[in-house]
Amino acid sequence: MEMMKKMMCGLALMGCALSSHAQVQGFDWSYSGFVPVFSTASSPQPQYGPFDPDYVLKGRFYAEDRDHNGTFSGSELISFTIYGNSFLNCTGSVRCGMSGFSYTPGSVLNFDTYSVTQTGQWGTGWWEQTVHSYRANDSFYSVYETDWNPNGGSVYRHNFTSETKFAISAVPEPQTWLMLGAGIALLGAAKRRRSRNA
C-alpha cells in the first residue's frame, strides 16, 4: 500500500512538471445555425433559404500564448483546421492562408481564412476550381467554377445571424492522457494484487 502511495505521488509530481512546461493549447470549436444563400453566374440574384439551426461549422486549432497576454493571435497559431482540413499547412494543388485570427478564452473566436483547390488548365475543358472562405461571425462560402459548365460558377454561402450559437472546449493535453493511462494501469495492478492476496 505504501508503494502504491509513492507511485501516485510520483505521477502527480510528473504531471505538474509536464504542465509547467506545456504552453501549447488546443481547442475544439463550433458554430451552429445559419441562413443558407445560393447563387450562380447566370442567376446572380441571391436565393435565401430559411434559418437552419442544425447546420454546423466546426474545427480545431492549436496555439501558444508566447507573450503571455491571455490572447492567442495569428502569429501564435500553430495549426488550424476546419472539418479536418488544414488552413495553415496546405500542400499539392491546395493553396490556403489566414488573414486574421484571435481568441481570448471566455470570449468569441475570430478568424478569416481561405483555401483554393485547382485542377486542370483553363480553356482545355477540364479546368475546375473550388474556393472556400470562412470569416467568423460574418459568413462562409464555397465557390465552384469550371470552364465547361455553361451556367458558369456557383456560390454556396452561409450567413451568421444573432441566433448562431458558438461553442468551444479545450482539447486534453498529452500529459492528461498519460496520467489517465498510468492511473488505470495502477488500479489494474492494485486489483490483481488484492486478488492474489485474497
Image: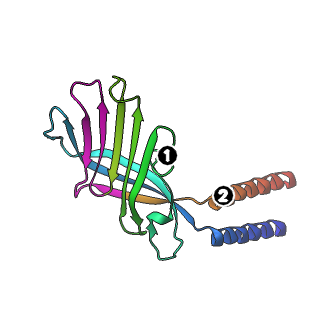
Residue 152, percent across and down? 23, 30
Answer with left or right where residue 165 lies relative to residue 10.
Answer: left
Question: For residue 143: magenta?
Answer: yes
Question: For residue 66: magenta?
Answer: no
Circles 1 and 2: CB atoms closer than 8 Å = no
Q: Residue at 63% across / 58% down in the picture? A: 174
Residue 125, percent across and down? 33, 22
Q: Residues within 10 Å of mark 1 (few under 14, many from 20)?
A: some
Extreme residue in the front direction: 123
Q: Nearer the viewer, mark 1 or mark 2?
A: 1
Q: Which mark is residue 166?
A: none
Which quarter shows the C terminus?
A: bottom right
Q: Residue at 67% across / 71% down in the picture? A: 16
Say if 171 sits above or below 37 in the image. below
Residue range in magenta is 137-166
User: Residue flagged by tag 1: what amino acid is it?
Assistant: Cys
Choose between 156 and 160: the one closer to the eye.
156
Answer with left or right where residue 198 lies relative to residue 65.
Answer: right
Q: Quadrant of residue 111?
A: bottom left
Q: Residue at 80% across / 65% down in the picture? A: 4
Mark 1 residue element? loop
Residue 186, percent across and down? 75, 58
Residue identified by numbered label 1 = 90
User: Residue flagged by tag 2: what amino acid is it?
Assistant: Leu
Mark 2 residue element? helix
Answer with left or right where residue 107 lies relative to residue 6.
Answer: left
Q: Residue at 68% across / 58% down in the picture? A: 178
Residue 197, percent across and down? 86, 55
Say if 130 sits above or below 133 in the image. above
Residue identified by numbered label 2 = 180
